[in-house]
Image (tube, rainbow, N blue to C red):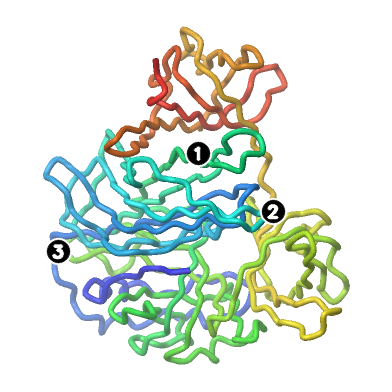
């Protein structure tokens, strides 16, 4: 899994914040605050940094969704600024539980209304057959993410943009059993100038010599192929460290040059955080990673499957990872288990629960003995099953109750929007795909829509998302 980091020219601002956060767990570092008195002054700047984080949701029919991101551009009233040009191959299904940085670019500060992405080489791998199909992308893979209210990149600040590719809503099977797919990109973006993405981030890189002091709660992680692209990783009492064999070790085993996977949450603060940043023109880009899990050696893998038996007294249980494949999962004292509501304990690992396990796989030479994965991190799929309906909106959507009648092939259905329901407007033409966040006033009679949510007790469908296909309008 590839990732991007902060350029070394901007990295000095990251050195201002390296205090580890203190919560009881694995005892990863001392939590001592670093000495910032010797931090060199940071030059003033007219530029800001934009981080594009890619995420996705799972889709039942596919085992992989591979694509190449080849370009990212910001577009505003003053023109275009290129964030990235190259080729980054990504499996979207690896991102069900993680945000992955795909672009970390520096641009002139200003106001913008659009992010333009270009993607290529879409490959869909069928979960049951393992066969790959390569559906064509509309408009050669150009996707515009539009925000009519605009978004700003401020001098010396970092703007996080979380892009949800939403494969579950973008990829449709054409015809029952045909095995053919139609792609209509439904892509959403959430801007965060301060605050945090909800998902964990997973970063891969090499430990750099600069500011290497894990005992003080910090080290610098640099891209394996670009030593000038780095990010500060904070180590605290809740950081669990695992060695190349997948077993728990102390943070003092980490050395310069180690290949590392760091999983945690971005720290993205503003000038009210009480640190050494200021509003006097000094660069303020407070984005670091507060690590929950550190895996040394680059040997970790992600395995997805179904729990076949609850953990025994030794913390072992069987995981079905395919129709004919079973693995053994070994829980450890420091294994972290996550669900949608936060940290769980092993009692959440019930039979038939779908999980994803991150850890080092120990391969067995004996065909009668399962491969074993030493679990560092487990994600429990405890999300509610989402239902969907499609049809057209009947006349006169009601803005007072934020409801409308949906005309479907099976009859008319009352649809009520939940309080924080998202509305996404999607259109396609020869020039590309446009995706835009909307509101209830954008819903009109005869629009072709797909609604996602759950059947309500009172008879109305409770929608937490509405996707409007503007291309299909009469």
Residue 407's x, y, as percent?
Answer: 57, 14
Task: Give left or right: position of 30 versus 275.
Answer: right
Task: Give left or right: position of 400 versus 408.
Answer: left
Q: In terms of image quadrants, where is residue 85?
A: bottom left
The residue lying at 57 percent from left, 27 percent from top is 463
Mark toward the start of the polypeptide (1 vs 2): 2
The residue lying at 55 percent from left, 32 percent from top is 464
Instruction: Decide which of 436, 429 is in the foreground and name it.
Output: 429
Q: Report how far apart the C-alphas of labels 2 and 3 lie in the structure.
A: 53 Å
Q: Which residue lies under the disc numbered 3?
A: 45
Instruction: Decide which of 15, 56 is in the foreground and name it.
Output: 56
Q: Report how far apart the C-alphas of labels 3 and 1 lie in the structure.
A: 45 Å
Residue 86's x, y, as percent?
Answer: 29, 64
- Judging from the image, what secondary structure is the residue with disc 1 in? strand
Q: Report how far apart the C-alphas of labels 1 and 2 lie in the structure.
A: 19 Å
Vertical comparison of 287 with 82: above or below: below
Q: Are marks 3 and 1 in contact (CB under 8 Å)?
A: no
Vertical comparison of 183 with 298: above or below: above
Vertical comparison of 161 with 44: above or below: above
Residue 112's x, y, as percent?
Answer: 22, 44
Residue 287's x, y, as percent?
Answer: 36, 64
Marker disc for residue 8: none
- Judging from the image, what secondary structure is the residue with disc 2 in? loop
Instruction: Decide which of 64, 151 is in the foreground and name it.
Output: 64
Q: Is residue 135 visible?
A: yes
Q: Which residue lies under the disc numbered 1?
A: 182
Q: Which residue lies under the disc numbered 2?
A: 128
């Amino acid at each position: 899994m590839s990732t991007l980091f902060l350029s070394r020219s901007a990295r000095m601002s990251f050195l201002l914040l390296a205090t580890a956060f203190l919560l009881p767990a694995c005892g990863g570092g001392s939590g001592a605050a670093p000495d910032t008195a010797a931090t060199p002054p940071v030059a003033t700047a007219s530029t800001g940094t934009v981080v594009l984080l890619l995420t996705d949701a799972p889709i039942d029919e596919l085992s992989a969704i591979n694509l190449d991101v080849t370009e990212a551009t910001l577009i505003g009233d003053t023109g275009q600024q290129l964030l990235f040009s190259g080729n980054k191959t990504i499996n979207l299904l690896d991102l069900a539980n993680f945000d992955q940085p795909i672009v970390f670019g520096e641009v002139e500060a200003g106001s913008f209304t659009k992010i333009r992405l270009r993607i290529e080489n879409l490959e869909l791998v069928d979960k049951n057959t393992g066969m790959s199909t390569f559906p064509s992308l509309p408009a050669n893979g150009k996707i515009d993410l539009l925000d009519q209210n605009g978004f700003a990149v401020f001098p010396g600040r970092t703007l996080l943009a979380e892009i949800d590719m939403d494969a579950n809503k973008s990829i449709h099977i054409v015809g029952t059993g045909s095995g053919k797919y139609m792609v209509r990109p439904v892509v959403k973006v959430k801007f965060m100038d301060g605050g945090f993405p909800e998902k964990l981030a997973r970063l891969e890189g090499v430990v750099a010599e600069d500011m290497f002091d894990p005992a003080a709660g910090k080290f610098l992680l640099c891209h394996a192929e670009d030593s000038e692209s780095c990010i500060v990783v904070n180590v605290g009492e809740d950081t669990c460290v695992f060695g190349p064999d997948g077993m728990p070790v102390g943070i003092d085993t980490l050395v310069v040059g180690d290949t590392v996977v760091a999983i945690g949450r971005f720290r993205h603060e503003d000038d009210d955080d009480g640190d050494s940043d200021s509003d006097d023109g000094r660069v303020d880009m407070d984005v670091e990673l507060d690590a929950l899990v550190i895996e040394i050696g680059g040997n970790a893998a992600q395995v997805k499957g179904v729990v076949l038996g609850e953990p025994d007294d030794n913390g072992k249980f069987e995981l079905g990872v395919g129709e004919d494949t079973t693995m053994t999962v070994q829980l450890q004292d420091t294994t972290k288990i996550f669900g949608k509501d936060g940290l769980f304990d092993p009692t959440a690992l019930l039979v038939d629960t779908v999980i994803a396990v991150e850890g080092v796989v120990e391969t067995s030479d004996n065909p009668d003995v399962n491969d074993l994965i030493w679990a560092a991190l487990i994600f429990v799929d405890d999300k509610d099953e989402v239902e969907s309906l499609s049809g057209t909106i009947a006349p006169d959507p009601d803005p007072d109750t934020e409801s409308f009648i949906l005309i479907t092939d099976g009859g008319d259905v009352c649809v009520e929007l939940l309080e924080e329901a998202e509305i996404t407007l999607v259109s396609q033409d020869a020039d590309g795909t446009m995706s835009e966040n909307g509101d209830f006033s954008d819903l009109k009679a005869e629009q072709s829509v797909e609604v996602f949510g759950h059947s309500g007790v009172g008879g109305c469908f409770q929608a937490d998302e509405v996707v409007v296909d503007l291309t299909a309008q009469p």
